[in-house]
Amino acid sequence: MAGSRLPRQLFLQGVAAVFMFAFASLYTQIPGLYGPEGILPARRTLRPQGKGRWQQLWETPTLLWEAPRLGLDTAQGLELLSLLGALVALGALLLSPLRHPVIYLLLWAAYLSACQVGQVFLYFQWDSLLLETGFLAVLVAPLRPASHRKEAPQGRQAGALPHEDLPFWLVRWLLFRLMFASGVVKLTSRCPAWWGLTALTYHYETQCLPTPAAWFAHHLPVWLHKLSVVATFLIEIAVPPLFFAPIRRLRLAAFYSQHLAAEPGHGSRKKTATSWPKALLATLSLLLELAVYGLLAYGTVHYFGLEVDWQQRTIHSRTTFTFHQFSQWLKTLTLPTVWLGVASLVWELLSALWRWTQVRGWLRKLSAVVQLSLVGTATVALFLISLVPYSYVEPGTHGRLWTGAHRLFGAVEHLQLANSYGLFRRMTGLGGRPEVVLEGSYDGHHWTEIEFMYKPGNLSRPPPVVVPHQPRLDWQMWFAALGPHTHSPWFTSLVLRLLQGKEPVIRLVQSQVARYPFHKQPPTYVRAQRYKYWFSQPGEQGQWWRRQWVEEFFPSVSLGDPTLETLLRQFGLQEKSPPRTRSANSTLAQALHWTRSQLSPLEAPALLWGLLMAVGAVRFVQALLAPCSLRSSPLAPVSGEKRRPASQKDSGAASEQATAAPNPCSSSSRTTRRKK
């Protein structure tokens, strides 16, 4: 990937975009989640223990320790971090000079700071994934902006630094761990839906926040759902090792949805005569590719019993191996995948060392070896750290890892530089989607349902589309429904805030307070019921859901109720002392309050989509203002131009001429192009 500037820039822009949405989405929810009147006030999480400043920062790495120095409480400091993080990420998304290691280090540090006080609402796997990817972006980002360098042979830029491929290798290793572990845990969990290939007959209906498209996907034929599960196992377990295949076309097949051409105009090159050893090597490579594809096809048909029923026009599938056989296969394969990563990394390091030997000039050579040493050491260290969470997929491999890797991981585990992953380990809601419905009452006899903005509730309301917003309360309500309320202590605090009529929490339920049924006066009683939800059947007009009452989830309570007080005391949620108002009159606090007042009328999805449209508009204007420079860029293919390898002297001269040209649209810049 690093052979071209395009993949690196798109990766950095993508990471910046995700950070921007993550910070902006979190900002809209801070008062209700972490404010003084929120569900889990953030000020409770940071309590000085009498330790030194640096020791305290290392053990709980968050910049929010410094909030009091700015005259802010913890929640206000979190607001400031989120605003600054969103703005810095926006700058990195729009401006190339801001795609710098320091910028991505700041973004990573800010998000890590938020996760330290985020408690259960920031415990999701995608938060860990963003932290790990964000730290890799620190290594991927260039120390200085790349000039318009001419493309060298084999897709690399003339003057590209030797170490540039190493961080991208870590990205590849992360993608491998994410995909492979997510596939393996589906089978090691012994979930009957995954083993029976029926998981997707439930998934669209029982996922955390379904969309309208999920309703239509849910009603697809069962045989297609089962075939999709087979494809899931193929993509997540069998394909990821090909990320490290020695043949480029195999890697492209594995990365087909992410491939970016590293060589502009590659498809228009004319074929030239090659020597017989190269022709033989190409033939052997093609045969190896065909063998791999054939093995994948045979394994899929054999292990999942694929049979085509031409009469019914369906494909039958079933799992033909046992849990014991899969466990033995996993024990045999996991350690070799570790050695596959080691071999691939060693190859990348040797390749980087070879590229360093090609650097000319002792000063450039010295600079290159320093950067290669630092990035190479960081790459090896991060790889060793990642082996520990990766080995969780197979306990035997975990115990056989080098003890030094365990010690290194233990020393930095709290920084979340490497994490374990396993998406959709078990399929929930096999007998119906469990859903918690809150109800309020003034007299304890007549109850009114409290409808949330995003999670299922009203049977006739279509599922909303909230992406790229992440409504964390609605998401946690899905987890709460999977067990008793005692497994979700925060739910008791939510009930308390609704009884108190706290507006920040009400805005998490309904951003337009007038839609909240108890906006004029808080309810006297609150309770919760557990239902099972199913998608409606085609033809049921005006209905998206069906439901059936199951049981009482949370008992009816009121303020001062002994049951409520006991639960608050049991979970440590009682208010021991009122929050201090040290920052009410500070200039920074007033600025934060004014910003909140301006943005609060907007619903979070509308705010984030407006931000996305603004980014698109700015990029469009940028493209209009600089069309000539894009056309004259040495990276842009020239129609009818024959591309041939150039010597380092020629490429250096072309680079100097391109740099010396004061106007990219002038005729002098066009004279540097090679003519046929």
Image: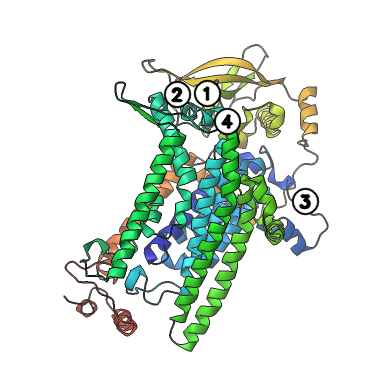
Residues at marks 1 and 2 touching, judged by CB atoms closer than 8 Å: yes
Disc assigned to residue 457:
1
Residue kind at label 2, given as amino acid type? Arg
Distance (Cα) linking label 1 and label 2 = 8 Å
Distance (Cα) linking label 1 and label 4 = 27 Å
In the displayed structure, 358 sits above or below 4; it is: below
Residue kind at label 4, given as amino acid type? Cys
- Residue closest to the far top: 445
In the displayed structure, 211 sits above or below 123; it is: above
Which residue is at a point 31% across and 68% down the rendered structure image?
Answer: 278
In the displayed structure, 450 sits above or below 42; it is: above
- Residue 54 appears left or right of 216: right
Which residue is at a point 39% across and 52% down the rendered structure image?
Answer: 258
In percent of width and height, residue 101 lies at 53, 66
Distance (Cα) linking label 4 and label 2 = 31 Å
- Residue corresponding to mark 3: 47
Residue kind at label 1, given as amino acid type? Gly
Disc nearer the start of the sequence (2/3): 3
Residues at marks 4 and 2 touching, judged by CB atoms closer than 8 Å: no
- Residue corresponding to mark 2: 461
Mark closer to the observer (4, 3): 4
- Residue corresponding to mark 4: 191
* Mark 4 surroundings within 10 Å by alpha-carbon count, few (fewer than 14), some (14 through 19), many (20 or more): some
Please tell me whether mark 2 sits on a helix, a strand or a loop.
loop
* Mark 2 surroundings within 10 Å by alpha-carbon count, few (fewer than 14), some (14 through 19), many (20 or more): few
Which residue is at a point 31% across and 56% down the rendered structure image?
Answer: 620
Mark closer to the observer (4, 2): 4
In percent of width and height, residue 309 lies at 33, 25
Distance (Cα) linking label 2 and label 3 = 44 Å
Disc nearer the start of the sequence (1/3): 3
* Mark 3 surroundings within 10 Å by alpha-carbon count, few (fewer than 14), some (14 through 19), many (20 or more): few
